[in-house]
Amino acid sequence: MEQSAEIALQIPRLRRYARALTGEHAAADDLVQDTLERALSKFHLWRPGSNMRAWVFTIMHNVYVNQLRARIARPERESDDAAFEVQVRADQDDALEIRDLHQALRQLPDEQREVLLLVGLEQLTYGETAKVLGIPIGTVMSRLARGRERLRAALAGKPVVTHLKAVK
């Protein structure tokens, strides 16, 4: 199979993950485009027989982190486009639940949200998620547990309480 065709098979998953990660359609589309561009230019680094999905998700994670760092380094002013954004009121319960879930996900720390989305939405294994994020499997498991707990609390309208242990 041609390299672009192999990568193209991953686009729907990349778009879904990017939208959940960024929370904005335009930012998600930019993230997917940047990811695809990098994947195609670096395709010679992919090892045949390895997991293509994990490879492109790793690229997307790295691109996203780089974009966050760049945004922190140079804060942006709010664009005039925000004034023209049309607000549409949801009129179905499903739409309200999705909105609530989206808002609750946005409240999570990036580390927990990334793990929740990769495991829950993209159905990557803990091992694949650990590889994509470059962290140990135990860290994936703990971030997932803490993220699920915070998400449940946020969806129930309860304040999120963080239990920290004193370490000497």
Image (cartoon, helix red, strand yellow):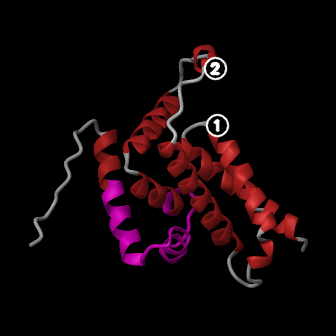
Which sits in the foreground, 1 or 134?
Answer: 134
Name the residue type under label 2. Asp
| Gap between marks 2 and 1 measured at Cα | 14 Å
Dot 2 alpha-carbon crowd within 10 angstroms: few under 14, some 14 to 19, many 20 or more: few
Residue that mark 1 sits on: 25
Displayed quadrant of residue 156:
top left
- Range drawn in magenta: 119-148
Residue designated by label 2:
81
- Does 159 appear above or below 44? above
- The residue located at (48%, 57%) in the rendering is 114
- For label 2, the SS is helix
Residue 61 as seen in the image, left or right of residue 158: right
Image quadrant holding the N terminus, namely bottom right
Identity of the amino acid at label 1?
A: His
Q: Quick check: is 128 in the magenta stretch?
A: yes
Q: How many marks?
A: 2
Q: Is residue 7 above or below residue 83?
A: below
Q: Residue at x 53, y 75 (%)?
A: 131
In screen coordinates, is 16 left or right of 109?
Answer: right
Image location (x, y in percent) of residue 144: 38, 62
